Image (cartoon, rainbow, N blue to C red):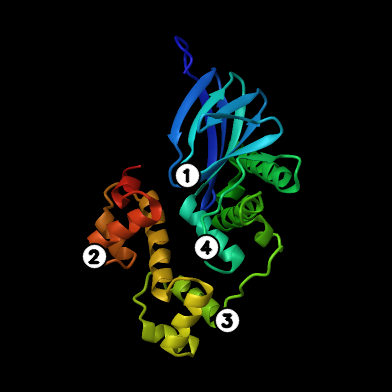
Amino acid sequence: LAARRQFSLEMYGVPLGDSLIAFNRFGTDTVVDGGRVEGAVVVSLGVGRPMASWIDGEKVSYTNNAVVFAPGRRAIHHRLEGGGEFTLRIGFEDLQRRLANALDRNPRDPIRFDVEVALDSAPGRHLHSLIAHLVECAEADDPLLANPLVRASYDDLVVSWLLSLPSNYHEEIHGGRPKEVAPEVVRQAEEFLEAHALEPVTIDELVAECGCSRRSLFDAFRRSRGYTPMEFLRDRRLDRARMALQLAPPGRTVATVAHDCGFSHLGRFASAYRERFGELPSDTLRS
């Protein structure tokens, strides 16, 4: 941080759903030690003045590039007075879930993006334009972004462009390899569980809805997804719980949120929540 000067930073942002779009404008020369990136993927694009970052001690360039910060990477940033920065942030587990939807199967490995992405490439150019447009709407307090359906549509578009950036799944996402198509019964089961995530759903009800045997349903999930129907339901409930904790009004407790989202045992809920999101539900509620 610049010494003996008044620190100045303007921030604009809008949560879209799984993703968050933001813009930072720096009024002083600033060095930010971000530590290790935890639980999220962040894409940073410079605006105006030159920017620099060091990832695991190696300097990366923002010259016509976007820079991707991934979990486990240590990041230090240098921002100049008058410069700006567009950022896109999405929780890593949320991104893995969206990747599974794009692949139509459970990913074998975590997604790994290239650290630097050229903005003159098609994905980089479109992602930059989209983020800039959304930041402009946020700065103008555009009432359109107050519509949850509009935000959800933008969220899908932003994450789709993010997944199109160079990564270890680039070829498969862009059609280089055939996808493993999930059976219709799996799609039907997931749609039913998504729609009834906050209701008490039994396996008997699920197989009756899908019109198949328990064994056939579990075999279809194992082959095409790598997880069970109840694991899918648990993750959807955890997603709902995380959103409820992030938006919780004063006085709302973790126990109440857990119960409302279908978790009867608070200890098991906290353990599953920490495994999925990398923090305790009480940490999310406090933040």
- The residue under label 4 is 108
In the displayed structure, 5 sits above or below 272; it is above
In the displayed structure, 213 sits above or below 47; it is below
Which numbered tag is attached to residue 71? 1
> Residue 141: x and y, percent?
58, 40
Based on the displayed image, in which of its 4 quarters is residue 227 positioned?
bottom left
Task: Determine whether, in the image, residue 163 is placed left or right of residue 188.
Answer: right
Closer to viewer: mark 3 or mark 1: 1
Of marks 4 and 3, which one's residue comes earlier in the chain?
A: 4
Between the residue at mark 3 and the residue at mark 1, the CA separation in whole angstroms equals: 34 Å
The residue depicted at 37 percent of the width and 50 percent of the height is 278
The residue depicted at 39 percent of the width and 53 percent of the height is 277
In the displayed structure, 116 sits above or below 148; it is above
- The residue under label 3 is 184
Task: Determine whether, in the image, residue 242 is placed left or right of residue 41.
Answer: left
- The residue under label 2 is 265
> Residue 106: x and y, percent?
52, 66
